[in-house]
């Protein structure tokens, strides 16, 4: 039946994070005791003050279509947030609110990328970057990193990846899937390379900004010379445990913001009214309201890193943000475990699902075929049991 579908959809890969989560659910429904460490979703509830703002919005009848680019009050609140947290002076005309940060990224790709434009992706990268760029006619150019480099690219690697066709670089910090956080010094060094190429734009995905154990955070747009060529992407899904509310936003040069509004006006139009009113409360809140959740994630990170380091053959950095670890499992490639030959990270991930009943995601989905992604967005008790199972089936 694929003959009836467009070439576009037939060439599109399925999100492997969502595919593994669906498979885990299916096996659970069959009665198997599956522990799913595949999805990147906080296991906390949305804070009560945000829920109260949503209830108030319902009572005040915010039930009509919203402006395509977002409520003016929300855009003003986002500007205050950018100034407070990132020292970025955006105006409301620089802000576009979308149905999740994923739509923000799709809008950017659609309005910026022409057929054959190259987009540099430091690998590992979030799973959907690659396919969004491809759908927009762009050519993803992967720049590999490893656990030894803390999964960060160097200025020399960036320079080597640039060609006359390079249009953009997309990256996330803290990074999904590695949890790595670029320091101001590291971003400044990369910016010095980009100074020589004024026509290259930067997409800085900062959705995990507040889930950060390094004590500092740097938006690349705050580095001299980078503001007018950076599109800063953020949202409330991760830090405020609002994944289902579906609100993301960008801060961008005005001509890009206008173009994204134009694109969105033909696709989804304005984002959900109640979710937008609730988001005003979220972005206006002092980030200290998140301290309890961030502290819990840090404790889980320390637990998981400690337990994984006890498993022979797994190499691991200590991530400084997000809620993932990204161990290198390549020492098991070519080995046969319980009758199963492990050829790559896909096989390794499926082996853990079949033998340990633990769902992870292959690193191949994120541009690193030597690793797997493990989400620690669940309780310490469940994490301890999951790593115990993994250790047992790898013994």
Image (cartoon, grey):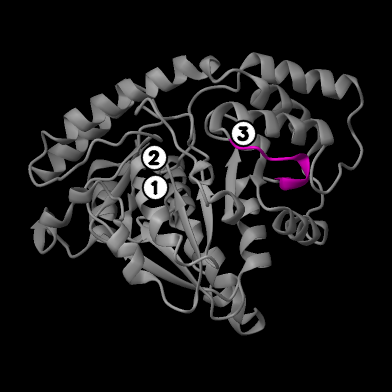
Vertical arrangement, residue 376 with respect to residue 171, above or below: above
Q: Residue at x 14, y 61 (%)?
A: 333
Q: Nearer the viewer, mark 2 or mark 3?
A: 2
Residue that label 1 marks: 188
Which quarter of the picture shows residue 117? bottom right
Mark 2 or mark 3, which has the lower sequence index?
3
Task: Name the element at disc 3.
Answer: helix
Dot 1 falls on a residue whose secondary structure is: helix
Q: Could you say which is closer to the camera, residue 341 or residue 240?
A: 240
The span picked out in magenta is 88-97
- Report the mark closest to the observer, 3 or 1: 1
Q: Residue 166, how many percent across, how many down?
A: 48, 73
- In the image shown, does 164 or 151 lie closer to the viewer? 164
Q: Which residue is mark 2?
A: 184
Is residue 127 visible to the viewer in this orientation of the structure?
Answer: yes
Real-space Cα separation, disc 3 to disc 1, in angstroms: 19 Å
Q: Is residue 264 magenta?
A: no
- Crowding at mark 2 (Cα within 10 Å: few <14, some 14-19, many 20+): some
* Residue occupied by mark 3: 82
Q: Distance between the Cα atoms at labels 2 and 1?
A: 6 Å
Look at the numbered discs 2 and 1 and tell me whether their residues touch, using CB distance below 8 Å. Answer: yes
Q: Point out the residue furthest to the bottom here.
A: 3
Q: Measuring from the top left, give residue 310's x and y in whole percent.
A: 10, 33
Percent across and percent down for residue 262 are 80, 60
Query: In which quadrant will I find the C terminus?
Result: top left
């Amino acid at each position: 039946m694929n003959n009836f579908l467009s070439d576009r959809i037939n060439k599109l890969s399925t999100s492997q994070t969502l595919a593994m989560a669906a498979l885990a659910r299916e096996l659970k429904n069959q009665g198997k005791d599956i522990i799913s460490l595949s999805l990147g979703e906080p296991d906390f509830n949305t804070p009560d003050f945000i829920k109260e703002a949503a209830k108030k919005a319902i009572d005040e009848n915010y039930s009509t279509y919203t402006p395509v680019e977002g409520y003016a009050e929300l855009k003003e609140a986002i500007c205050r947030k950018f100034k407070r947290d990132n020292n970025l002076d955006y105006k409301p005309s620089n802000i576009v609110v979308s149905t999740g940060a994923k739509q923000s990224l799709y809008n950017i790709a659609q309005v910026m990328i022409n057929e054959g434009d190259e987009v540099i992706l430091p690998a590992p990268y979030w799973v959907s970057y690659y396919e969004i760029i491809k759908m927009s006619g762009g050519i993803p150019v992967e720049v590999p990193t490893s656990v030894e480099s803390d999964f960060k690219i160097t200025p020399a690697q960036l320079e080597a990846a640039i060609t006359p066709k390079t249009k953009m670089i997309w990256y996330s910090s803290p990074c999904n899937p590695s949890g790595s956080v670029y320091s101001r010094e590291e971003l400044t060094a990369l910016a010095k390379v980009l100074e020589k190429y004024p026509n290259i734009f930067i997409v800085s995905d900062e959705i995990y900004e507040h889930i950060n154990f390094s004590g500092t955070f740097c938006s690349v747009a705050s580095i001299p010379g980078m503001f007018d060529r950076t599109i800063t992407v953020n949202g409330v899904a991760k830090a405020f445990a609002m994944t289902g509310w579906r609100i993301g936003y960008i801060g961008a040069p005005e001509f890009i913001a206008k173009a994204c509004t134009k694109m969105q006006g033909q696709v989804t139009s304005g984002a959900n009214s109640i979710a937008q009113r609730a988001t005003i409360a979220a972005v206006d809140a002092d980030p200290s309201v998140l301290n309890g959740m961030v502290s819990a994630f840090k404790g889980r990170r320390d637990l998981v890193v400690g337990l994984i380091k006890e498993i022979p053959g797994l190499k691991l950095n200590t991530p400084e943000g997000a809620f993932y670890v990204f161990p290198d499992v390549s020492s098991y490639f070519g080995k046969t475990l319980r009758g199963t030959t492990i050829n790559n990270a896909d096989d390794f991930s499926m082996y853990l699902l079949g033998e340990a009943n633990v769902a992870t995601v292959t690193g191949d989905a994120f541009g690193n075929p030597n690793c797997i992604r493990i989400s620690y967005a669940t309780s310490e008790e469940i994490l301890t049991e999951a790593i115990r199972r993994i250790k047992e089936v790898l013994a």
